[in-house]
Image (cartoon, rainbow, N blue to C red):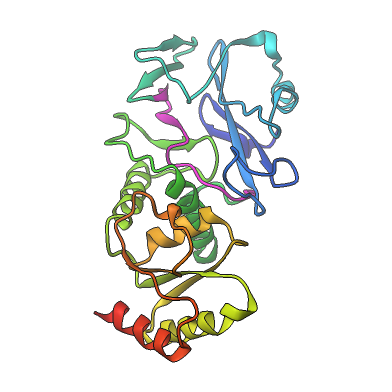
Amino acid sequence: MDESIIVAPGVWRLTVNIDDEDVPLFEDRWPVSEGVALHAYLVRGERAMVVDPWEAGGYGQEEVEADLKALGLGWKDLAAVVSTKTVPKGAFFDLGGGVSLSERGGFWFVEPAGVALTGDTFAGLGWIEDELWVEDLGEHEARYFEDEALRWFSSRPLVPSELPQGTKIVAPAHGCLWKNPEAALNRARQFEAWGQGEALGEITVVWPAGAEFDAGADALVGGALDAMAGLNLFRMPTDDTTAMAAGARRASLVVVAGGLGNSFMTGLEKDLWRPDPLAPAAELRRELVRRFQQ
């Protein structure tokens, strides 16, 4: 197999990309038209273990078996298969050759490599090919994967108080990996903070679909331009509610047309405006600017 699958000495990444042709919704909630990269991890000393093989329709036993075979292993060679969904407190596996896997702060932790296998924490969505490490992303890729990580986080906000002492690499069960553990922790804290009031200089608008509501949507787009604000525009019921949740979290003003539900904002403390979707366009435009600039 390609050397790029080696995360650290004693830790191999076994990855498959799936999309909505494989699963209609990832974990029955997240649309993945842009895919999601699922990682299992082989931890190997004199003995070997696999952490987090995903078996809900994309990365199951056949794919794990093929990856293990390429590394000269089979199921019979594994000491155990474990999950980050439930990590028994105090669990410890000595794999020989100086390699161990243990529970640290609710994560699986590999020594001496210093790899924290964090499961859903620090995870994200999006198809990954060469863009494995957050720190190696270009500007465009960084924004894309941050948006996909925020879309995940907004519906499953997980922020640990700290990482295990000695962590050198953060390796979630899906999404990009981190060479800088403190940066991973800081981003999770930032995502959490965005939900508690003002965030970025952006407005998120959730508006009904239909030609009769287009004039109002156009007016709000114009208002965002007048206010020199970033704009996230969604139309209900056609657009993805997990993207709405992410857009609401990152915005400082959220506009949800009267008559529409806003359960995607559960847990957020945001400046919320609920205008009449059929109000005069000029009125909508002026009021959006006023509310954003106040």
Taking 79 as reference, is 261 left or right? left
Look at 47% across and 58% down and name the residue there: 261
Q: Which residues are magenta?
A: 107-129
Left or right of 7, for residue 90 = left
Q: Is residue 98 magenta?
A: no
Residue extending farthest to the left is 294
Residue 71 in the image: state x and y as whole percent. Answer: 69, 23
- Which of 159 and 216 lies nearest the eye of the viewer? 216
The residue drawn where x is 28% and y is 81% is 293
Image quadrant holding the C terminus, namely bottom left
- Residue 139 point in image, percent of width and height: 49, 65
Residue 40 position by quadrant: top right
Where does the image place residue 86, in percent across and percent down from the top left?
Answer: 45, 21
Q: Quadrant of residue 272 in the image?
A: bottom left
Left or right: 283 in relation to 97: left
Q: Nearer the viewer, residue 107 or 19?
A: 19
Whether residue 43 is visible to the viewer of this picture, yes or no, is yes
